[in-house]
Image (cartoon, helix red, strand yellow):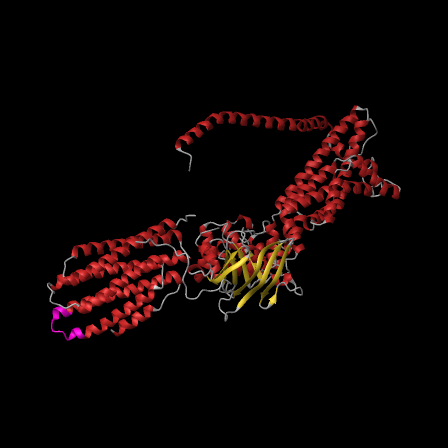
Amino acid sequence: MTRLIDPSLEKLSQIMSEMGDMAIACVSLAVDSYLEGKNTNDEVYELSDSIRNKYFEVEDLIFDMLLKYQPVADDFRMIRSSTEISYAFSRFGRYAYDITQVRDLFGDISECTNASLIEITKKVKHMIKEAVLSFAELDVRKAVKIQEDEAFIDKIYKERLPKLIQSNNTKCALAEALLLRYLERIGDHAVFMSDAINYIVTGKHKPSEKRIASHTKSS
Amino acid sequence: MTTLSVPAQKITNSIDSAIPSSVPHEEEKFKMIAENVSIYYGSTMGVKNVTMKFPEKSVTALIGPSGCGKTTFLRCLNRMHDMTKNAKVEGKVMIDDIDLYDKSIDPIYHRRKVGMVFQKPNPFPTMSIYDNVTAGLKLNGVKDKRILDEIVEDTLKMAYLWDEVKNDLKKSAIELSGGQQQRLCIARALAIQPEVLLMDEPASALDPIATQKIEETITELKKDYTIIIVTHNMQQAVRVSDYTGFMYLGELIEFRETKKLFTDPKNELTAKYVQGQFG
Amino acid sequence: MSTTNEKRQEYRALFKNNVKKRLVVDKIVHIIIFAFVIIAIIPLASILVEVFKNGISAISYEFLTAIPGSIGSGEGGIGPAIQGTLIIIGLASLMGVPIGVMSGIFLAELGDNKLARNVRFFNDVFMEFPSIVLGIFAFLVIVLILGHFSVWAGAFALALIMFPIVARTTEESLKMVPITYREAGTALGLKKWVITFRIVISAAKSGMITGILLSVSRIGGETAPLIMTILGSSQFFSSMDVPMDALPLRIWRLSLLPYESSQLQGWGAALVLILVIIGINMAVRYHFANGNGIIMRFIKQGVSTKR
């Protein structure tokens, strides 16, 4: 039996899936072109903008559903988490765009070494893919891997930043600092996403926020 | 890319057993406890071995599809089934440690501890507003006019009806609107100074504004009374109640804090029902 | 949604054809029903007209208050008969109504067992008993035993006719009160009989009164039982142990006489009887409608604060 809310839920799921695909493409494009020295600003900007529009669409749809259908139980948790997750997608797009802007701001940074960034970007790309897949399949077991990845990124972030202070090349140091910051934030949002997915499936709010909060205080 | 779907099975860390937890918090004081209640109509079992504990000064909602036994169960809490032929009730219903079904007690005396409001407003048609409210008192021998006046004002205020009728208490009760009649019935039930108030779909025959007033009344009343309300309107249950019990085919399927039951029901059947996937 | 627009047009076309015919049939049925109503009313109306026409000239103050004159003289009146009818109706009601109401309450409230079913059956049979048989019964039981005709016997006979009707109508009226009022009373912790007497009866009183009035109208015109019990007389009421006059008896006697003057008096008496019955009906309805009657106050005592 089709309930009144079902078509809206279908539409929500479709838009979220498109956003997920776009987020993966956007971030991958941004970091790869940074590391390879390519200019893909326009493409990244387009993707990021599309994601942002879809975010507004999702918000509208969610509030429309709340107004009309007063959903409960599974529907309610799905809708509630979708606000968090769609916001995460929009942030991915935004940070991807910011990453491409670094090259514009700093000009030619082809002499900077990107060794540390390579590891992190691999992890970030992996994290986003895992998060999107976890949402598609509502599989909370992936949350463990996502958290491991995020812990790794945090570690690198904390290690690299002090070293950058001692760097001779200000331009490269600042560029790398910005990149690290953006990638670390992408990682945070991926974890928030996995917490939201956990809420859909188990109905429990995870205390990851506390973890994140505590480490941002110290950094 | 795979499209999303509502999960067919939930992967949870701890899966609660299917036996419903009828104990919200052990430390809470319970005003009324129904233990192993079964109700038979002839040979049909309308309510099957239900146990529920109702915390004091709270609102408990009973939900479930038509014919699930929630109204039958509600009516046994003040022994209304005594009036029905062929109805048999087994089990205990305790108020403050006294079993209402104990053969040694006077049912009429103890029935007064539990007030009831019915689905269709039923003020006594040949009596005025004043007489309706005092019917439970006068016809039981309370004669002091001063006390009766006080109780009339008091209960009509509690039912949010005083301001609308205070100038004409002698008016016939059936001249009131549906919503006002129902609030009059609430005042009438409160006049006998009960401790528990049972409400059988009290707003289902009323328009939305009247319904809202009834819900506001219930929210105020729960400061002093323990209220048990049967409703088929789930949003009403969410708005008004602290605890909710879901019944199906005569059994209690799940009983939890309202917010938890509606956002994260433990039982598949409950989840299906509240999301409108059947009945 | 398998009907297409074409099919819908087709169906609509069908309807148009039927409508005219159905309207005609409707009108015809209306006319037939109306005709039957007229047929039913005509006899009633013509009786009233006939009685009024023939009897009005007999009415005078003397006619209404004097005792009958000598037979065939055309003098005198039907005073004792009027008084007798009122007395016998009143006495019979005093005896029959309470018993009937109590039986009706019993049947309605406690009526789900074998005893009640039997009582109900006998009640219905009793209602159809020929009144002359009841008259003979009263004759045997009271007149023969006491050795004389008396008012007691007459009241007894009429009460026997009355109470099955009152019992039945009381039971039906009580049963028509929606169960929800009884439930409300139970939920308030009221005892069963308090609910019955203070709440249910008060809601059923309109139906009950109709039943009582029906039975009063019925006995007001009964003749056969009166023949065997109060016999009739030419004097006003003197005591309970002697015969008494009543309108049906007087009408009967007068109409059997060959004199025209007696016939005229008979018509007059018939007119008076009809007016008395109508009068009782209207007076009681008016009283209860306003709620000022003595009985009404009695019923409301303890529940109302009207003084």
In the image, taking residue C143 as reference, residue B108 lies left or right, namely left
The foreground one among B206 and B277 is: B277
Can residue B178 be seen at all in this image of the molecule?
yes
The foreground one among C223 and A67 is: A67
Q: Residue B101 lies in magenta, yes or no?
A: no
The segment highlighted magenta reads A163-173
The residue depicted at 14 percent of the width and 58 percent of the height is: A39
The image quadrant of residue A35 is: bottom left
The image quadrant of residue C8 is: top left
Dominant SS of magenta comes to helix
The image quadrant of residue C145 is: top right
Labels in figure, total: 0
> Residue A34, how many percent across, how many down?
16, 62
Can residue C231 be seen at all in this image of the molecule?
no
In the image, taking residue C249 as reference, residue A68 lies left or right, namely left
Identify the image quadrant of the C terminus of chain A. bottom left
> Residue B140, how many percent across, how many down?
64, 59
Say above or below: C174 vs B222: above
The residue depicted at 75 percent of the width and 44 percent of the height is: C96
> Residue B238, how many percent across, how many down?
44, 58
In the image, taking residue B122 as reference, residue A59 lies left or right, namely left
The foreground one among C44 and C242 is: C44
In the image, taking residue C197 as reference, residue B171 lies left or right, namely left
> Residue C83, how many percent across, how many down?
77, 38
The foreground one among B248 and B258 is: B248
